[in-house]
Image: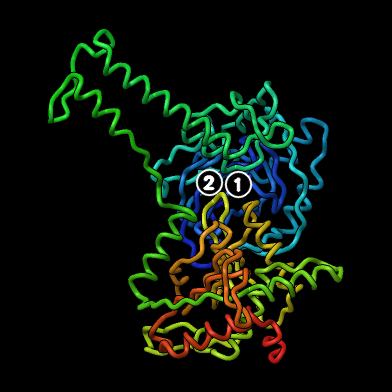
């Protein structure tokens, strides 16, 4: 006899209290194995696939895609032991699931143990002999308690039929964010022609279609305002008139509201807190980066993995922090203390489809330029694919912001709270420069340092920035610290 167990949204760590359902990976009626990912959720830190600690048949799902759930809210219910009964009824046998159930969960989320390896997902059509023995799940902790399952999970209720398979074939979309953008705006992805490889639908394709639809709506509304025969019989009052004025007002009042949640919400909260808590100041300097670029070209010409400019700048930052440890610190307001940190966990700002993220390179002080370059590449690729974990995005002690990739020269960065400083790097471009007493065209970059004035004074910040600029202009200066 099957036992129905409720799987709740687990504690995903890093102090996260809620998550948004991005994509369900299983349907009602699916057979799941221990530790099989069942749903993809988006937290304020990253996209996470949540594994189920039970093996059995999915009997109900709680929350549609796009729903935000608090930690501890029910995600789904599983009829444990039902998979073996289904296999017996269909002649398939259920030993694998029974063994997995006996060995226990192998996931590593907070509140669950470790053990068996995940098995492959199977979908079966439940037989009439499959019954659930427990009472219904407790969805009363959710704002909208109705599960997606059409049947009530009870001792006399059969497992629901699996969702029908779309007969038109798969939509050429990889990113769940693209699907979500289309879904929230009522756009049918099957009507789009993708501009990516093999017709892959990209975010740009969806945004282009939405802009075209919005322009069409505005055009139609404007035409209705100009054409008497297309005006409504009963004008809508706006408080300043009716008729044509109301129609024009409706056109001018088109707006889009974007919820501040997920990564965007977390960024907004962190930047607001930084501005409200940290008395920051900024200093900047122009530097001749010609020799640094020549040194990089020589390093890459010698063979082996390529070294990025960001990696060289990171190596310079680490050396500068060793000289000026005041900037590798945080402020403990409760104790009224400045806490200087021994390890450098170097964050770097990266723009992705999900918005601005700051992955962290752990123990940057122990890495050479080649190792830094490889880690920057790995984290950047993970960010673009939405695979960054909460651990990848937390724990930074100093941030390097290369806004030069946007084609700008300077900026005044906002400190990544609770850190004490951020180095900003503009684009490296040919400019007239006095070199060895003569005017020449050199590769020039603007460097800016925003720092917490509580941890140090301008002299320390200026010394740090001047040392960074000296290393950029004369990379041999860096050799003294290696």
The crowd level at tag 2 (other Cα within 10 Å; few <14, some 14-19, many 20+) is many
Viewer-side residue, 264 vs 151? 264
| Cα distance in 3D space between marks 1 and 2 | 7 Å
Q: Quadrant of residue 193?
A: top right
The crowd level at tag 1 (other Cα within 10 Å; few <14, some 14-19, many 20+) is many
The residue sitting at the left extreme is 240
Q: Quadrant of the C terminus?
A: bottom right
Report the disc number at residue 21: 2
Q: Is residue 301 visible?
A: yes
Report the disc number at residue 438: none
* Residue at screen point 70% across, 40% down: 31
55 lies above or below 464: above
109 lies above or below 224: below
* Residue at screen point 70% across, 25% down: 169
* Residue at screen point 62% across, 33% down: 159
Q: Which residue bears the numbered disc 1?
A: 39
Residue 478 in the image: state x and y as whole percent.
68, 86
The residue sitting at the front extreme is 438
Could you tell me if the residues under marks 1 and 2 are in contact, i.e. CB atoms within 8 Å? Answer: yes
Instruction: Report helix, strand or loop for mark 2.
Output: strand
Q: Quadrant of residue 257?
A: top left
């Amino acid at each position: 006899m099957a036992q129905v167990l409720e799987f709740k949204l687990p504690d995903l760590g890093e102090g996260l209290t809620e998550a948004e359902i991005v994509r369900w990976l299983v349907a009602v009626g699916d057979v799941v194995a221990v530790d099989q990912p069942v749903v993809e959720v988006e937290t304020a830190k990253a996209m996470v696939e949540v594994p189920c600690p039970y093996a059995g048949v999915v009997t109900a799902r709680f929350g549609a895609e796009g729903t935000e759930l608090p930690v501890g809210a029910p995600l789904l219910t599983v009829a444990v032991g039902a998979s073996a009964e289904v296999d017996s009824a269909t002649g398939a046998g259920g030993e694998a699931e029974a063994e997995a159930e006996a060995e226990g969960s192998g996931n590593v989320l907070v509140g669950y143990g470790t053990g068996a390896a995940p098995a492959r997902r199977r979908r079966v059509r439940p037989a009439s002999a499959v019954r659930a023995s427990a009472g219904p799940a407790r969805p009363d902790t959710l704002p909208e308690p109705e599960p997606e399952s059409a049947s009530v999970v009870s001792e006399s209720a059969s497992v629901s039929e699996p969702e029908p398979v779309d007969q038109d074939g798969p939509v050429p979309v990889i990113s769940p964010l693209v699907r979500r953008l289309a879904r929230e705006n009522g756009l049918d992805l099957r009507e789009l022609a993708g501009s990516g490889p093999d017709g892959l639908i990209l975010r740009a394709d969806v945004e282009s279609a939405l802009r075209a639809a919005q322009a069409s709506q505005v055009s139609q509304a404007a035409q209705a305002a100009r054409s008497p025969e297309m005006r409504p019989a009963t004008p809508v009052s706006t408080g300043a008139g009716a008729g044509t004025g109301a129609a024009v007002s409706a056109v001018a009042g088109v707006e889009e509201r974007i919820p501040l949640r997920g990564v965007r919400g977390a960024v907004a909260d962190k930047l607001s807190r930084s501005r409200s808590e940290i008395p920051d100041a900024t200093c900047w300097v122009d530097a001749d980066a010609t020799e640094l670029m020549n040194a990089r070209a020589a390093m890459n010409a010698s063979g082996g993995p390529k070294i990025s400019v960001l990696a060289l700048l990171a190596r310079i930052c680490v050396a500068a922090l060793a000289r000026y440890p005041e900037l590798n610190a945080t402020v403990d307001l409760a104790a009224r203390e400045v806490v200087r940190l021994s390890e450098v966990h170097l964050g770097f700002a990266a723009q992705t489809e999900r918005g601005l993220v700051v992955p962290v390179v752990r123990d940057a002080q122990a890495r050479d330029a080649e190792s830094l370059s490889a880690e920057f590449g790995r984290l950047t690729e993970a960010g673009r694919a939405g695979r960054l974990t909460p651990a990848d995005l937390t724990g930074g002690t100093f941030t390097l912001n290369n806004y030069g990739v946007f084609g700008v020269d300077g900026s005044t960065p906002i400190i990544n709270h609770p850190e004490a400083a951020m180095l900003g790097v503009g684009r490296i471009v040919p400019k007239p420069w006095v070199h060895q007493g003569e005017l020449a065209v050199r590769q020039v970059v603007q460097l800016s340092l925003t720092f917490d004035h509580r941890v140090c004074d301008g002299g320390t910040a200026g010394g740090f920035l001047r040392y960074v600029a000296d290393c950029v202009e004369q990379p041999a200066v860096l050799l003294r610290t290696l």
